[in-house]
Image: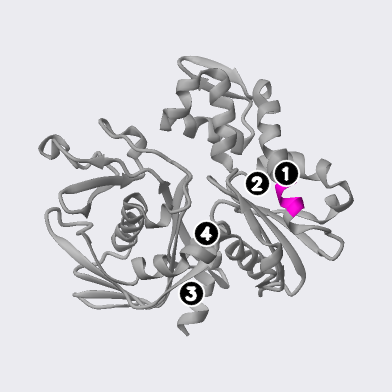
């Protein structure tokens, strides 16, 4: 990283705007004999603030940023968005999500947090940025996303309210989300990407992706995705407790956290609900996802390793071994499944920036 009083230049960074959360890398930090890629995240909710801006105070108690994505229309994004009063929005799983105003707001929010971490004074220059898309849209939306993120972006100054800074993305590339996890896993475990035949199963917030590759090179005919992710699992639980809950972002986040961590209960309207009572509904969602993957991938006899990643990988691990008993010994859990994709993106961006 190079910095002056006026500008900060980063050779590489990565952002992964998902349906459930937005992840980003903040640079590297020395860790003994190596360096660690620093990561952060915030919820992928970008409520529109169309009126009453005078009363919407962004004081020190707020952990977020107000962004004007469309003329006269502001979006609030950040780590405390779930607790922000008078906010609304959706986590709709749609194919054109990367072309929406909400996506752009979340992307700019990630740039804001990056600029704040780097203590940017006036301009942040990113030489190579890697962003991700699920397998369901990687081939249809890569070009439009690359155009969206490349170039100049104006964001609020992270330490000087009322003023703005420029972020210049000189080059950008779009990576399939599970490919990032595969590369991160190989680099973390072997010091370099693996050359084996791999199947990555990425249970994200909005989609379940499968990625078949020889080394890091995908077999496009066997890769695919289904619109079944952690959100679908949380929705299955909420709909059984009370249908209105699936429209409450905070409750959905609680249920998702309980499912992801394996918690025994989740507290809703002052009552503790046993997660085990709702597991059959969640299991049904996961089984549907695995069956769709099997139809797409076909025979697995030539696969050497199966990597489970994504925020819903803990849930997936409870059913995948029973559904694929002949391959259970090949299944491996990602150590940090939530951030694995974006860390892999960062590694790719670093190598492309050289």
Q: Residue 52: x, y in percent?
A: 13, 35
- Tag 4–tag 3 contact (CB < 8 Å): no
> For residue 349, which numbered disc appears in the image?
3
Between marks 4 and 3 in the image, the one whose residue lies nearer the viewer: 4
Disc 3 or 1, which lies upstream in sequence?
1
Q: Residue 99: x, y in percent?
A: 38, 57
Q: Which residue is mark 2?
A: 313
- Tag 3–tag 2 contact (CB < 8 Å): no
Q: CA distance from mark 3 to mark 2?
A: 25 Å
Q: Which residue is mark 4?
A: 137
Q: Which residue is mark 1?
A: 317
Between marks 4 and 2 in the image, the one whose residue lies nearer the viewer: 4
Disc 4 or 3, which lies upstream in sequence?
4
Q: Residue at x 72, y 44 (%)?
A: 317
Magenta stretch containing residue 194, yes or no? Answer: no
Q: Residue 266: x, y in percent?
A: 55, 24
Disc 3 or 2, which lies upstream in sequence?
2
Residue 57 found in image quarter: top left
* Region rendered in magenta: 290-295
Label 3 crowd (10 A; few <14 / some 14-19 / many >=20): many
């Amino acid at each position: 990283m190079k910095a002056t009083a006026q500008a900060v230049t980063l050779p590489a960074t990565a952002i992964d705007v998902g349906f459930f959360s937005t992840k980003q890398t903040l640079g590297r930090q020395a860790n003994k004999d190596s360096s660690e890629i620093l990561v952060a995240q915030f919820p992928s909710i970008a409520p529109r603030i169309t009126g009453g801006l005078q009363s919407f105070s962004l004081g020190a108690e707020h952990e977020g940023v107000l962004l004007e994505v469309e003329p006269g229309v502001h979006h609030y994004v950040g780590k405390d968005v779930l607790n922000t009063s008078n906010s609304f929005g959706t986590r709709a799983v749609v194919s054109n999500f990367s072309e929406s105003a909400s996506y752009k707001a979340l992307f700019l929010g990630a740039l804001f947090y990056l600029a704040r971490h780097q203590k940017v004074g006036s301009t942040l220059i990113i030489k190579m940025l890697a962003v991700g898309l699920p397998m369901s849209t990687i081939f249809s939306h890569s070009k439009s996303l690359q155009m969206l993120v490349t170039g100049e972006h104006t964001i609020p100054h992270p330490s000087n309210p009322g003023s703005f800074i420029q972020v210049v993305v000189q080059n950008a590339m779009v990576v399939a989300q599970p490919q990032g996890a595969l590369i991160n896993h190989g680099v973390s475990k072997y010091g370099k990407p693996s050359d084996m035949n791999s199947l990555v199963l990425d249970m994200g917030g909005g989609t379940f992706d499968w990625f078949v590759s020889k080394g890091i090179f995908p077999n496009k005919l066997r890769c695919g995705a289904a619109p079944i992710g952690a959100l679908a699992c949380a929705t299955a639980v909420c709909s059984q407790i009370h249908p209105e809950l699936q429209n409450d972002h905070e409750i959905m986040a609680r249920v998702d956290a309980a499912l992801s961590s394996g918690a025994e209960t989740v507290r809703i309207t002052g009552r503790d609900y046993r997660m085990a009572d709702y597991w059959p509904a969640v299991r049904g969602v996961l089984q549907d996802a695995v069956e769709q993957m099997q139809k797409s991938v076909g025979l697995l006899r030539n696969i050497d390793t199966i990597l489970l990643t994504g925020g819903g990988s803990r849930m997936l691990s409870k059913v995948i071994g029973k559904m694929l008993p002949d391959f259970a010994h090949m299944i491996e859990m990602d150590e940090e499944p939530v951030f694995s994709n974006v860390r892999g993106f960062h590694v790719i961006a670093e190598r492309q920036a050289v």
